[in-house]
């Protein structure tokens, strides 16, 4: 715990220190003395926390002695040394703290609390007004400079669609690589929606260099990107934006891109994101280059490994193994819906990895009667059904349930009965928020490196690709988003019915 220390509020060194704090610089000597009387002085030992990321507070801090370190998402961003002032936004707004500050040696802070400034019994209203005017000028300068920051955006990233492990890491690696080339990297806060809205608050500036972050950290939307390297989820994405398929909406976005002098536009996501960036490109002038990075659990981009697929299969297989253990123990039949709207990559490979009994894929036709006959003689089984299985048929039938329930309905229609309990489990979306594993992190780094090469070589309308260890690129004109699975692998994921009986 920090130790409170006594001090002399009229100490000339203290008053000189306060005079250097911008919001207090206009105060008279007498007013500075009155401010000094509401301060508290604390001594911190090595490693003690001053501010915890995510917490709210109403206190700002002035460093009197020693060094304090700012960490953002576990990564060092900068140090505060004597004369530095931090936490000032808390005096205006109770927004959660953006980082953690801790002492890295024996250090001294002066603390100024918002409620004390407003307490008329300890500080005159005129003095408090001058202080808040000073803070208002400071915050306004941040906002003004932040607005100017987005007038010209060199490289802009766009994340869109369903979440997948690896969105954040590839953003960090792209910002690292391109920043080393002297490029400035920005990202849309809400995917394609941000380009349509096109306000300064719709964008973020990604900064990888600690030195550059120190210079810009006070500005709106500046993000220290190294912590994103191993971060879950997608911090700058929009849920699917179906309106973006409209020509008029795409043209509005294109006008925003041109107006902000964007040089390079990079889409990050799955098949829907590719469709969006590809369509947007037709309304952009030739000098604005477009690229695409595939991030999708279901690997729905043909000709390359996709960031997120390795983590997805690892987590999916483990979930299925758990169902298999329960199935054996309690003599149950599980029919599990998993991710896989089109190709069924995730469903197939998760089934294979776990050793489940059958993968039911979107593009396949099955002899349901043969499957039903096989299940009738079993004490336990686990069947993995891709979420896209017979999706059009389900819509036509106005079927309200999930893919697993529809498959079970087909089994019942054959006269299937079992003395054992049959349980249909819906698709669990927690796999989307899984921590990216090492294979996906490596793939994200390789994609970012290849993208950097393409940009340096004046490429355009290309997607970095990695397949069988080889790095190359695929032209937008050659990208396919119907990445169906190989039939020989599909046959491996069938431990239930002889091959000649399973097909219609």
Image: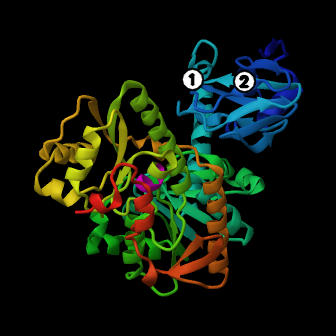
Looking at the rendered image, the disc whose residue lies closer to the viewer, 2 or 1, is 2
- Total marks placed: 2
Q: Residue at x 37, y 55 (%)?
A: 340
- Residue 77: image x %, image y %? 73, 45
Q: Residues within 10 Å of mark 2 (few under 14, many from 20)?
A: some
- Quickly name the residue at label 2: 111
- Quickly name the residue at label 1: 125
Residue 399: assigned label: none
Q: Secondary structure at mark 2?
A: strand
Would residue 440 appear left or right of 312 to someone viewing this image?
A: right
- Residue 224: image x %, image y %? 66, 50
Query: Is residue 159 shown in magenta?
Result: no
Q: Residue at x 36, y 39 (%)?
A: 381
Q: Residues within 10 Å of mark 1 (few under 14, many from 20)?
A: some
Q: Which residues are magenta?
A: 346-350
Q: N-terminal of the two: label 2 or label 1? A: 2
- Residue 154: image x %, image y %? 59, 72
- Figure quadrant of the N terminus: top right
Q: Secondary structure at mark 1?
A: helix
Viewer-closest of 459 and 420: 420
Q: Residue at x 26, y 49 (%)?
A: 371
């Amino acid at each position: 715990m920090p130790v409170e220390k006594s001090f002399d509020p009229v100490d000339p060194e203290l008053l000189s220190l306060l005079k250097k704090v911008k919001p207090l610089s206009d105060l008279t000597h007498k007013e500075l003395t009155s401010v000094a009387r509401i301060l508290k002085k604390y001594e911190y030992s090595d490693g003690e926390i001053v501010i915890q990321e995510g917490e709210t507070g109403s206190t700002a801090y002035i460093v009197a002695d020693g060094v304090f370190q700012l960490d953002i998402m576990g990564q060092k961003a900068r140090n505060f040394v004597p004369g530095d002032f931090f936490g000032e936004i808390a005096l205006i707004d109770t927004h959660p703290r953006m980082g953690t500050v801790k002492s890295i040696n024996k250090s001294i802070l002066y603390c100024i609390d918002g409620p004390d400034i407003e307490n008329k019994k300890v500080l005159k209203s005129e003095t408090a007004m001058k202080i808040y005017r000073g803070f208002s000028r400071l915050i306004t300068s941040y906002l003004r400079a932040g607005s100017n920051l987005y007038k010209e955006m060199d490289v802009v990233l766009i994340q869109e669609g369903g979440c997948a492990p690896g969105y954040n890491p590839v953003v960090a690696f792209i910002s690292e690589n391109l920043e080393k080339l002297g490029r400035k990297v920005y990202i849309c806060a809400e995917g394609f929606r941000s380009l349509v809205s096109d306000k300064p608050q719709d964008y973020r500036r990604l900064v990888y260099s600690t030195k550059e972050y120190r210079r810009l950290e006070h500005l709106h939307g500046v993000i220290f990107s190294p912590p994103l390297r191993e971060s879950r989820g997608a911090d700058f994405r929009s849920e699917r934006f179906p309106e973006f398929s409209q020509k008029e909406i795409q043209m509005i976005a294109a006008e925003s891109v041109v107006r902000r002098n964007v040089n390079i536009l990079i889409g990050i996501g799955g098949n829907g994101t590719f469709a969006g960036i590809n369509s947007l490109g037709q309304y952009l002038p030739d000098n604005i280059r477009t690229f695409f990075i595939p991030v999708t659990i279901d690997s729905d981009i043909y000709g390359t490994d996709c960031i997120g697929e390795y983590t997805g299969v690892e987590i999916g297989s483990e979930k299925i193994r758990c169902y298999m253990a329960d199935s054996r123990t309690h003599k149950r039949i599980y029919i599990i819906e998993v991710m896989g709207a089109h190709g069924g990559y995730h469903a197939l490979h998760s089934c294979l990895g776990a050793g489940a009994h059958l993968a039911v894929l979107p593009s396949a036709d099955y002899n349901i009667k043969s499957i039903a006959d096989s299940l009738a003689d079993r004490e336990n089984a686990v069947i993995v059904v891709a979420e896209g299985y017979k999706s059009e048929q389900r819509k036509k039938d106005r079927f309200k349930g999930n893919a697993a329930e529809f498959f079970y309905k087909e089994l019942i229609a054959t006269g299937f009965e079992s003395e054992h309990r049959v349980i249909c489990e819906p698709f669990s979306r927690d796999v989307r928020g899984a921590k990216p594993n090492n294979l996906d992190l490596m793939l994200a780094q390789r994609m970012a490196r290849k993208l950097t090469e393409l940009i340096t070589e004046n490429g355009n309308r290309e997607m970095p690709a990695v397949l069988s260890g080889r790095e190359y690129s695929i032209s937008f004109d050659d990208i396919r988003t119907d990445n169906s699975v190989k039939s020989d692998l599909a046959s491996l994921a069938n431990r239930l019915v002889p091959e000649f009986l399973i097909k219609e």
